[in-house]
Amino acid sequence: MKIIIAPDSYKGAMRAEKVAQILAEGWQSIRPDDEVVCIALSDGGEGMATALAAARNGRFIEIPTFDALMRPVSGKAAVLDNTAVLESAEANGIEHLSKSELNPLAASTYGVGIMLKKLLDSGFRDLLIGIGGSATVDGGAGMLQALGAKFFDRRDLLLPEGIGGGGLRDVAKVDISALDKRLTECRIKVACDVTNPLCGPDGAAEVFGPQKGASAEMVRSLDENLRHWAALWDDNADHPGDGAAGGLGFALRKILHAELVSGAQLIMRYSGFLDALPGSSLVITGEGCSDEQTVCGKLCACVAEAAAGHRIPTVLISGALRGDTTALEKIFCGCYSIAPGPVSLDEAIAGTGKNLRRMAANLAELISCSPAAKL
């Protein structure tokens, strides 16, 4: 029996390659003779560069930058021939911050701009940027500052670098005359499967703000600030995908003229996942938390759709299942949470490895015991 294990990262707990490895260990502890193919996937967030580098014999370069709170960190980008692959979360990622540090009013994409500038310095003009896993809701303002843009308040005073989502309300005038001219030579693609607009009930603040530490009051402020930010650029704040990464998608599209592409489809193609499907009997995928949004073009749903094209069932094994799972059950032949019971988030994260291994072993036992599933 050939099994493909192709998960996304478990955000805040474990990268996709490690998730796949542990699921494979659990499965093979029960069914050691099965052929198990592990393929780490991503939808443009954590793990995208690693997945592409592994599939395309790429290399990595280190880039000094800043995290979302403007503290020095070391990021990396993958190099595939003449293309640089950058995960913005290397700079503004939520995984750099503790739970108590989450603050989208202060968090900035400035470090993302620093990484882009240093890639330009290294001669790259073809850029692929994955923008998942962010801790920011600044509309990409910080990134633009790092690339040379200047913002002024109502008194015509220059605002400091590293502006966060809370500072957008203070911007009265934008000046991009000093924006890095080399950007006009670039071909920028943004790997993103989020279709949310910048503002409104489906926008960056309302949908993603709470998971980045925003209270209900902060969400309202951030949404108002983003709407003001869009107006400064004569934009209606309703373009699909602009709400990705707290509005980083907006700045990349509107100001840097980047093209948004499906991260999941790109990674599935270049990682070898699509080539591995023929002859497979089962696909196992998963993510940190699955809910109704999973079926709206997110990676695990794309995996299930691709497998269904070959009449291969897909099982979803996630860190948690949230809300009504009816929509999930329509595209997956089984939906499972690895949580052993009611536990705190810290306990769940600490037990990720053990619980993944247990769940994979249990699923393998189920396959072995089912007469209809003996393959």
Image (spheres, grey):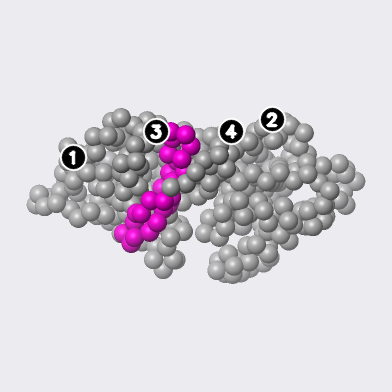
Determine which residue is flagged by label 3. Answer: 126
Given residues 247 and 160, the one toward you in this image is 160
The answer to which of marks 3 and 1 sits earlier in the sequence is 3
Distance CA(mark 4)–CA(mark 3): 19 Å
Picture layout, residue 267 above or below residue 25: above
Determine which residue is flagged by label 4. Answer: 269
Determine which residue is flagged by label 2. Answer: 309
Distance CA(mark 1)–CA(mark 2): 49 Å
Distance CA(mark 3)–CA(mark 1): 21 Å
Per the rendered image, the range of residues in magenta is 62-90
Q: Secondary structure at mark 1?
A: loop
User: Which residue occupies 63% across, 36% down?
Assistant: 272
| Amino acid residing under circle 3 | Asp
Determine which residue is flagged by label 1. Answer: 178
Mark 3: few/some/many CA within 10 Å (<14, 14-19, 20+): some
Q: Quadrant of the N terminus?
A: top right
